Image (spheres, helix red, strand yellow):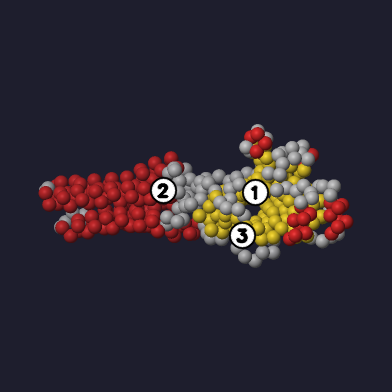
Amino acid sequence: MLNSLSKFSIIALFFILFCFKSAISASKSENKPKLDKSEIKTEHLVSAKLLYDEIYDINISQGHYRASVELLLIWEDPKTDEFLNKFGDEIIHGKKLDDFLENIWYPEFFVSNAENPRTLHYKTLDVYKGKFELFERFDVDLSIDAEMPRYPFGDLDLFLDIASYSGNKDKMVFYPESVQIGHHDAHHKIVKGNWNVTNTLLEEQGRTSLNHGGKEKFSYLISHVNVEHGFIDSLQKIIFPLLAIVLLSLLINHFYRAGNYDPWNWRVGGQLTLFLTIPALKFALSGELPSTHYLNLTDSLFIWATIVVTYNMILGILSHYKSIEEGTNEISALDKFARVSSPIVAIAVISTFSLTII
């Protein structure tokens, strides 16, 4: 009895270590050094500050999320004197803003990974410390590459691509100043759901466009918010149920031995019930699992559980057949083989996935 429990304890420990290794080996994005402003040659250097008021509806199955964003664009322009003479310290918006922007150059942009045009809440313009400050607050639905090979561990990159189009990089360049998750005095959870922010990054890239002959580069402001899935949520929804299914399958295979018809029938029926529970669990979690073209950690865990339960069910079917057709010696030999091979198969399969996935 103690020997049997030791086998199961080893498998459970190996499974936990497997998942823990996945969690600590997930890579973190690193901040890239920014160029000094004096090194950037352009007519309009536009400093940019980005703040997320809310990030919600993160769907890794369909690869999108929603965000409420504040964007502040700052640049120098001789027409700041004209603004001050006309409006003084006033912050303009609405028709005043639209009329004034028609007579000056200002950074125009679109969100390149938006699923539909952004919903603008309000837009303002003022002059602060001799520079124009254009402020926007908007909501946007964003598509992302839901790449999480170690899901439910690892990071998901919630990126936002802001593309300029009012001039190529000779005309304007975004200069990334900062990206923030919520205001310092906000009293609500910024990232909704079972997600935690691990890292943020705001960077600028030059990308070609078909505009202007297709050879000129335009400035893109790209923010990255790396989030990780809550461990407790993953534990109760994925890890614990699959571990329970595997352990129950091993226990049924180990303790329901040859003797009479009912135990063998129950042994096959029990494995069949567990076999059907696996796709039911995956279906229940379908909205939370990433749709990928590769084998991720969660997929490997479901495959592992399916292989173990299938193997034990096959052994149960063979044992049931031999209990009727063969002699006692044949049943005893197959029973010993099942008790030894089943834990070995479980460990071998999870070891293989550990080497290939992690």
Q: CA distance from mark 1 to mark 2?
A: 36 Å
Residue 170 drawn above or below residue 238: above
Q: Amino acid at mark 2?
A: Asp
Instruction: Residue at 60%, 55% (x, y): give it.
Output: 140
Could you say which is closer to the camera, residue 76 or residue 97? Answer: 97
Residue 162 screen position, x and y as percent: 65, 47
Counting residues from the start of the chain, the first of labels 1 and 2 encountered is: 1
Tag 1 and tag 3, C-beta contact below 8 Å: no
Residue at coordinates 67% horizontally, 36% vertically from top-left?
A: 212
Q: Which residue is mark 3?
A: 54
Distance between the alpha carbons at the discs numbered 2 and 3: 30 Å
Of labels 1 and 3, the one closer to you: 1
Mark closer to the chain start, 2 or 3: 3
Q: Nearer the viewer, residue 291 or 78?
A: 78
Q: Which residue is mark 1?
A: 110
Which x, y percent locates residue 340?
27, 47
**Residue 232's mark?**
none
Nearer to us: label 1 or label 2: 1
Q: Which type of secondary structure does the marked residue at label 3 adopt? A: strand
Are there few (<14), some (14-19), or many (20+) residues within 10 Å of tag 1? some
Instruction: Say which mark, if any, is on residue 299.
Output: 2
Residue 38: x and y, percent?
79, 39
Residue displayed at 28% across by 45% down: 341
The kind of residue on which mark 3 rests is: Glu
Image quarter (top left, top right, bottom left or bottom right) of the N terminus = bottom left
